[in-house]
């Protein structure tokens, strides 16, 4: 056998006008590549980047006796196989082989049991591709006209953006409420077990003490049968309870049981990889892809929790051998799918083969990121076939009468695990576990019984504020999309990547923050195309695609209903766009109300052609330059929920000229610290005060706009600085900041300096030493010291460091460089985030070199070729 990859799709719809063949350029539908009036016939063109590879595949097909198509067994894989047949046009038997793990037995079985190409699955993929193209090409221009150029809309990306924006709106509307509680340490009065244990105040005169869950998002109590303590009441209560006797009023014991989680599907794998390994969705899927291709795990794009009999037997053997029969249930465990419309075409994600390789063995053969992912998959799979974790949970209720006569009850809870079961191997995390006190999970209480006396060791009042709903992380957004039935296992990672690449979402730590542009896009979609971002509607479209794949629905009528609509029913996409475009008020969709200033003028956040800004006052259509309107830019790193009315007014009050640092001793003009298009800088005076352009200087990379001082400003404005004259020839030596960083110059000779700080401190003697060194050519400047050392990269194993580059800070492992993105800071960058940035950069491959220009060809003189007899072909 000769095995060759197609490297994904070899043809697709035209990417742009240049892709459209000359024969179709005049067609009105050529822009989309879909002839909507001819049963939505798509125009496919070969990928121009793969011309040489297609040539190679054709030559291999020409010499083959039969063809096996072994693409993935999903819609996309089936479509790739169909396109290969269409382009390569083999004249030999074609067989479709499918497998879910790359092991010898699985491949042999697939070769021995080929099937026909599933044209229904191809139809479903084609329908999805056409749908997405029409959606994007029809709706995106609306955003260009009403929000800003170069934006995009998409069937799933717009819904995912709406989910993130909706959560931010909840945070913006949220009003925090304060409440206090009292916690204490207690111990038995008599007996040998004097161990201290913690208990929390639960009841005051029989009324339950309020906790965070008792408040609504508007800061008001959701019920009236609770009591709220403020700081004064809580402190007074502590005083009243000091030294009073306590007794156990009740002891209640309940059995504790926890079942293992189901084996991984794509979404749960991405969620756990995010929580446990700090991997983003894309990084987790890259690690899984690598493991699959190397034959270590089964196919990683699946929504089925099913394990084959082979896998169950392998897991049970492993449990018996490594953890003992006491952790092995009598019968295998089977898990019901909880995902809407799970396809169950594949197994759950599990270690490959009929006996699982141990994580230590695999770690010797794969990069660290893949080793960590494999260990996670191995543990989850094995644990899924183990016994429950069991034990006992005990609750003690301690009562007392305070000095003020109030009756109080404290609650103490403890759990004793008697059989660890699956927890010998694996513990599932949840998003709530981030703030969970892990000590609560297994806390022993002393053997106290009802009526036993206890003493108070310490009491402490503690204040709390209710928290707004947490922002989505990549993992929790995948979970939410799965719950809504939006997207499929093969698309989750790309959805997350797309909304970040489009600038609709940026990361603050691991949290996904929507941009102000995302608010405008969602305003347009919700206000004028509500169906297109309706969760149920989008989920139904996914269901319909599944029906097409199953042969229960036809693609063309379904597309016609979506695009043209039904007579007397919901209008189609074409009509919606053409009719509603004039009704969209650009100013309204690009505005977020923030409140009213003291003078009664409205304050809003707006998205303009050049980015977001705050505005005070009303601009009327007939008075675009109204004098009562003031504006100020919104800094890039301000999340929408932090842009309060007070913060907006602060931006508006900031002088246009920037922050005043003081008066320049030479000119008497004020020196300003300003934010500019190319970064922060200081400036002497204003344009109005002088005929020439005001003198300015960029801040050093170690300075910030908020903290730069007058002394800093005068120093950097003093550059270029004359250091002195060379005692040998008398030539003057100067230091200055240039396009490629700090350097010193003497006549036509120059040398790079290591840091910007040297511009202010380097001496004449030090300059002479630097000049005596061989000159480095551009690109050979002495390396700057790193801004931070991050530790080893989990994928490459190389040390990660953060450096300061020409275009700002970036992280590197010595081979790949990745710029820090919006929301990332050098100080707050985590190891996981640095590794994720590098993994994203690595996935894009090496930087492309600029193509060399071809020299113009000379026309050769025409020459008649000598006729030659054709050689006879052997049969």
Image (cartoon, helix red, strand yellow):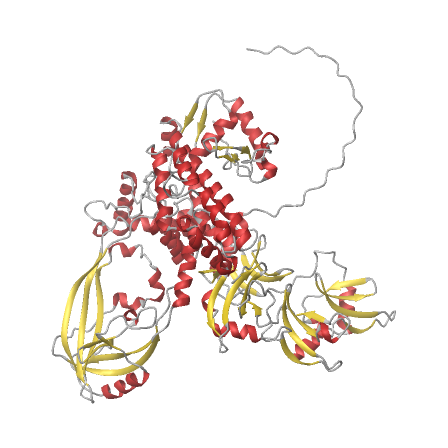
> Quarter-wise, where is residue 123 in the image?
top left
Residue at the farthest bottom position: 403
Kindly tell me whether residue 414 is visible in this rendering. Answer: yes
**Total residue callouts:** 0
Q: Position of residue 410 (x, y in %)?
A: 21, 77
Left or right of 460, for residue 696: right
Q: Residue at x 39, y 67 (%)?
A: 173
Kindly tell me whether residue 505 is visible in this rendering. Answer: no
Q: Position of residue 585 (x, y in %)?
A: 50, 57
Q: Nearer the viewer, residue 303 or 242?
A: 303
Q: Nearer the viewer, residue 794 or 720?
A: 720
Q: Position of residue 497 (x, y in %)?
A: 48, 51
Q: Nearer the viewer, residue 735 or 226?
A: 226
Left or right of 107, for residue 56: right
Q: Quadrant of the C terminus?
A: top right
Rendered view: 547 above or below 869 = below
Left or right of 366, for residue 341: left
Q: Position of residue 127 (x, y in %)?
A: 43, 36
Residue at the farthest right position: 729
Residue at the farthest front position: 622
Left or right of 470, for residue 582: right
Q: Nearer the viewer, residue 604 or 397?
A: 604
């Amino acid at each position: 056998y000769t095995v060759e990859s197609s490297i994904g799709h070899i043809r697709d719809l035209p990417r742009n006008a240049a892709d459209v063949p000359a024969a179709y350029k005049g067609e009105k539908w050529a822009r989309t590549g879909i002839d909507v009036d001819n049963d939505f016939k798509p125009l496919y063109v070969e990928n121009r980047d793969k011309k040489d590879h297609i040539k190679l595949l054709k030559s291999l097909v020409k010499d083959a006796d039969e063809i096996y198509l072994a693409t993935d067994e999903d819609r996309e894989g089936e479509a790739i196989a169909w396109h290969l047949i269409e382009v390569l046009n083999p004249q030999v038997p074609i067989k479709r082989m499918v497998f879910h793990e790359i092991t010898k037995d699985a491949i042999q079985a697939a070769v021995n049991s080929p099937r026909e190409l599933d044209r229904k699955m191809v139809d479903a993929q084609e329908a999805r591709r056409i749908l997405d193209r029409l959606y994007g090409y029809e709706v995106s221009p609306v955003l260009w006209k009403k929000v800003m150029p170069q934006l995009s809309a998409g069937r799933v990306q717009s819904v995912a953006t709406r989910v993130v924006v909706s959560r931010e709106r909840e945070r913006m509307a949220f009003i925090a409420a304060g409440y206090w509680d009292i916690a204490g340490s207690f111990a038995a009065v008599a007996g040998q077990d004097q161990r201290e244990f913690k208990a929390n105040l639960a009841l005051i005169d029989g009324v339950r003490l309020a906790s965070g869950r008792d408040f609504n998002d508007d800061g008001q109590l959701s019920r009236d049968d609770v009591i709220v303590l403020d700081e004064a009441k809580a402190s007074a209560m502590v005083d009243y309870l000091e030294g009073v006797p306590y007794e156990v009023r009740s002891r209640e014991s309940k059995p504790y049981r926890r079942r293992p989680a189901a084996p991984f599907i794509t979404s749960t794998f991405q969620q756990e990889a995010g929580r446990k390994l700090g991997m983003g969705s894309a990084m987790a899927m890259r690690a899984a892809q690598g493991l699959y291709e190397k034959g270590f795990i089964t196919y990683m794009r699946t929504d089925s929790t099913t394990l084959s009999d082979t896998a169950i037997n392998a897991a049970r053997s492993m449990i018996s051998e490594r953890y003992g029969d006491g952790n092995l249930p009598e019968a295998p465990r089977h898990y019901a799918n909880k995902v809407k419309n799970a396809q169950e075409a594949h197994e759950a994600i599990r270690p490959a083969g009929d006996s699982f390789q141990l994580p230590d063995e695999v770690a010797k053969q794969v990069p660290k990121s893949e080793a960590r992912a494999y260990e996670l998959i191995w543990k989850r799979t094995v644990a899924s076939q183990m016994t429950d974790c069991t034990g006992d949970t005990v609750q003690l209720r301690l009562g007392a009468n305070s000095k003020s006569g109030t009756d109080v009850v404290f609650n103490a809870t403890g759990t004793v695990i008697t059989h660890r079961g699956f927890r010998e191997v694996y513990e599932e995390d949840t998003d709530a576990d981030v703030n969970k006190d892990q000590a609560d999970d297994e806390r022993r209480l002393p053997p106290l019984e009802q009526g036993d006396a206890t003493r108070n060791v310490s009491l402490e009042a503690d204040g709390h504020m209710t928290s707004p709903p947490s922002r989505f992380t990549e993992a929790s957004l995948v979970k939410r999309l799965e719950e809504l039935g939006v997207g499929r296992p093969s698309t989750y990672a790309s959805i997350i990547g797309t909304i970040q690449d489009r600038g609709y979402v940026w990361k603050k730590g691991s949290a996904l923050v929507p941009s102000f542009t995302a608010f405008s896009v969602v305003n347009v979609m919700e206000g004028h195309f509500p169906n297109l971002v309706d969760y149920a509607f989008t989920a139904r479209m996914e269901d319909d695609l599944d029906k097409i794949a199953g042969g229960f629905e036809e693609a063309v009528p379904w597309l016609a209903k979506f695009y043209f609509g039904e007579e007397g029913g919901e209008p189609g996409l074409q009509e919606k766009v053409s009719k509603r475009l004039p009704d969209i008020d650009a100013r309204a969709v690009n505005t977020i109300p923030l409140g009213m200033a003291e003078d009664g003028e409205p304050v809003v956040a707006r998205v303009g052609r050049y980015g977001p800004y705050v505005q005070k006052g009303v601009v009327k259509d007939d008075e675009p330059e109204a004098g009562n309107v003031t504006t100020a830019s919104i800094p890039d790193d301000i999340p929408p929920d932090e842009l309060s009315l007070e913060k907006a007014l602060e931006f508006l009050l900031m002088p246009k000229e920037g922050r005043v640092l003081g008066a320049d001793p030479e000119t008497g003009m004020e020196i300003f610290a300003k934010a500019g298009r190319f970064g922060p800088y200081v400036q002497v005076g204003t344009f109005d005060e002088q005929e020439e352009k005001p003198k300015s200087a960029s801040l050093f990379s170690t300075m910030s706009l908020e903290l730069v001082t007058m002394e800093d400003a005068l120093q950097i404005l003093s550059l270029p600085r004359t250091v002195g004259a060379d005692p040998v020839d008398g030539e003057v030596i100067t230091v200055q900041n240039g396009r490629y960083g700090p350097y010193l110059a003497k006549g036509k000779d120059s040398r790079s300096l290591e840091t910007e700080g040297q511009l202010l401190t380097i001496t004449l003697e030090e300059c002479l030493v630097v000049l005596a060194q061989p000159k480095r050519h551009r690109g050979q400047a002495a390396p700057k010291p790193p801004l931070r050392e991050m530790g080893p990269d989990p994928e490459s194993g190389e040390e990660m460091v953060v450096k300061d580059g020409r275009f700002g800070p970036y992280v590197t492992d010595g081979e790949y460089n990745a710029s820090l993105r919006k929301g990332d800071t050098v100080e707050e960058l985590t190891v996981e985030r640095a590794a994720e940035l590098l993994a994203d950069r690595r996935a894009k491959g090496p930087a492309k070199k600029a193509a060399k220009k071809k020299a113009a060809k000379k026309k050769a003189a025409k020459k008649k070729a000598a006729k030659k007899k054709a050689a006879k072909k052997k049969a």
